[in-house]
Amino acid sequence: MVAGAVAGIMEHTVMYPVDSVKTRMQSLQPDPKAQYRSVYEALKKIVLTEGLWRPLRGINVTMLGAGPAHAMYFACYEKMKKSLSDTLQQGGNSHLANVVKQRMQMFNSPYKSVLSCVRTVQRTEGFGAFYRSYTTQLTMNVPFQAIHFITYEFMQEHINPRREYHPRSHIVAGAVAGAVAAAATTPLDVCKTLLNTQENTALSSLNISGHLSGMLNAFRTVYQLGGLPGFFRGVQARVIYQMPSTAIAWSVYEFFKYFLTKHKLEKRTSL
């Protein structure tokens, strides 16, 4: 759990600016000032027009949720792998953290701080607003983690069959696993982003009053606004984010697992 918590915080902290870009690139009807052709162009434009620290808005709430989420995430992974000799597990981040994070990442976000965002959303939309993407996120996490862990284990079988601590193999396997899982589940991630952000311009164009909720409604709305290509908005940013992100997570996790296990064994031996 310690190894998982450290890995989760490192992963989300280092790659957070790209995650901010991904959220914006998934916008179905973006503001003319927030239209980007690539991740690099987006980061450059955001920094030049909105300030150096703008891509990091909301990072504190993400770090707060990443630690405990990934502690459970990897603990469940190890337990299930030992019990079932399989790699499928259901993991997820804090839903409240996700909603706040993505609202603060949007262009022209009116929220000045995490606490301000939480208070405003709770007051204007109710506590249920933090769980509008709950079913979509669960539906996304199951196939994402299944593909992610199976691909990681498959890669490890081929490049590190003895399952020793080998940094390069963990980085490569993690990057490939993240890329494959991210690309495959992008449609669900686009729907999750729409439910979390409640993109006003997009919903207004379809005369949707109130707030959008439910996975099926999100799918229908994305299709109406962008057709089939709409489900893959931001796929480039998502893959670019997930490759180094999962490479960092696995390499940090495997290092701390190795370090803590080795330390524990040495302590037992000395006794």
Image (cartoon, rainbow, N blue to C red):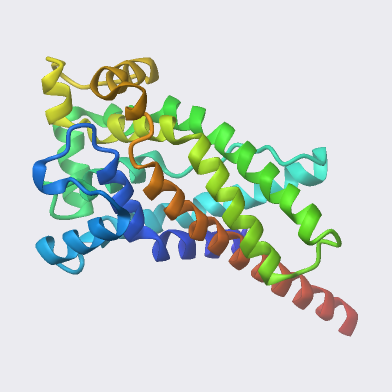
Q: Residue at x 23, y 22 (%)?
A: 225
Quadrant holding the N terminus: bottom right
Q: Position of residue 11 (x, y in %)?
A: 48, 61
Front residue of 19/110: it is 19
Front residue of 119/214: it is 214
Q: Is residue 52 above or below residue 191?
A: below
Q: Residue at x 20, y 67 (%)?
A: 53
Residue 191 image-quadrant placement? top left
Q: Residue at x 27, y 30 (%)?
A: 129
Front residue of 128/192: it is 192
Q: Position of residue 89 (x, y in %)?
A: 65, 38
Q: Position of residue 67 (x, y in %)?
A: 48, 57
Can residue 271 be seen from the camera position used here?
no
| Left or right: where 65 falls relative to 205 | right
Front residue of 196/147: it is 147
| Left or right: where 131 falls relative to 109 | right
Quadrant holding the C terminus: bottom right
Q: Position of residue 111 (x, y in %)?
A: 14, 49
Q: Is residue 20 above or below residue 230?
A: below
Q: Residue at x 40, y 42 (%)?
A: 235
* Total numbered labels: 0
